[in-house]
Image (cartoon, rainbow, N blue to C red):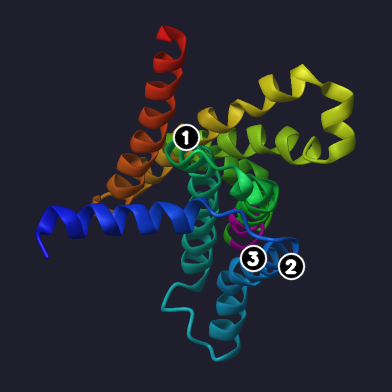
Amino acid sequence: MPAWIYEKTFRVQWLGFVSKVPGKKLATRFRVGIFLLCLIPLLRLFWLAFHDNLTANPIEFVERSTGYWALFMLLSTLSLSPIRLLTGRSWQLQYRRMLGLFMFFYASLHVIAYLWLDYAFNWPDIIKDIAKHPYVLVGASAFMLTVPLAITSSNAMIRLLRERWKQLHRLVYVIAILGVVHFLWLVKKDLREPMLYAVILALLLAIRIYYRISKRKA
């Protein structure tokens, strides 16, 4: 089979798979599956802690792990709309709220680990650390912006805020940029992982900007 025919056939089959709207039962299974997958990082931390295997610096490991997964959940949430733009299907958007709340959950654990495990709520030392390491301030700013998004994530708040809800939740792009900058600034030597996150975020934003410009021209 010629390569171009194989490529075209594979592309049609793949787009047909990702664009197929799942039934109610399958959508529920997806929801349960995603929920359980999102719990794996937390269960892994408990497992490692139970077996005393949180590396030589357990506090730093917990901070890095929860921060990593918070950013991963955030980028996963942001990827759902570009998928809609690329495939023309929107059924995956029903999982956006759950992923966003898991992002807030892991971000909260990240902040709690920093405030409690690392500094035992010693606010003078925390202020000194922020002054010494500005990336902490960037991360704190990102987390503070997630709070109103989590509070207003319910259907009741969507109905209450109406158009202002959309305007408020555009903060997610600012949060994502701050989160990536926080990660880049935090890592001193090996920048490959934070750079990967930066490239993924840039790609997701580029897709949205491209389609928005194309829509305006049309």
- Kind of element beneath mark 1: helix
Q: Where 177 sits versus 35, above or below?
A: above
Disc marking residue 85: 1
Between label 2 and label 3, give the one nearer the viewer. Answer: 2
Residue segment shown in magenta: 109-117
User: Is residue 199 or residue 82 the one in the foreground?
Assistant: 82
* Magenta residues, dominant SS class: helix
The Cα atoms of the two marked residues, 2 and 3, are separated by 9 Å
- Kind of element beneath mark 3: helix
Q: Where on the picture, by quarter, is residue 27? A: bottom right
The reply to whether residue 116 is visible in this rendering is yes
Q: Amino acid at mark 3?
A: Phe
The Cα atoms of the two marked residues, 3 and 1, are separated by 21 Å
Around disc 2, counting alpha carbons within 10 Å, would you say few (fewer than 14), some (14 to 19), or many (20 or more)?
few
Residue 182, image x and y in percent?
A: 43, 40
Residue 119, image x and y in percent?
A: 60, 55
- Kind of element beneath mark 2: helix
Q: Where on the picture, by quarter, is residue 109? A: bottom right
Residue 102, image x and y in percent?
A: 65, 55
Disc marking residue 25: 2
* Mark 1 vs 2, N-terminal side: 2
- In the rendered view of the protein, which quadrant contains the C terminus? top left
Residue 95, image x and y in percent?
A: 66, 52
Q: Amino acid at mark 1?
A: Leu
Q: Which residue does the image show at 75% across and 61% down from the upper left?
A: 24
Q: Amino acid at mark 2?
A: Lys
* Mark 3 vs 1, N-terminal side: 3
Q: Which residue does the image show at 41% across and 78% down from the upper left?
A: 56
* Mark 2 vs 3, N-terminal side: 2
Around disc 3, counting alpha carbons within 10 Å, would you say few (fewer than 14), some (14 to 19), or many (20 or more)?
some
Q: Disc 3 designates what residue?
A: 30
Q: Where 115 sits versus 131, above or below?
A: below
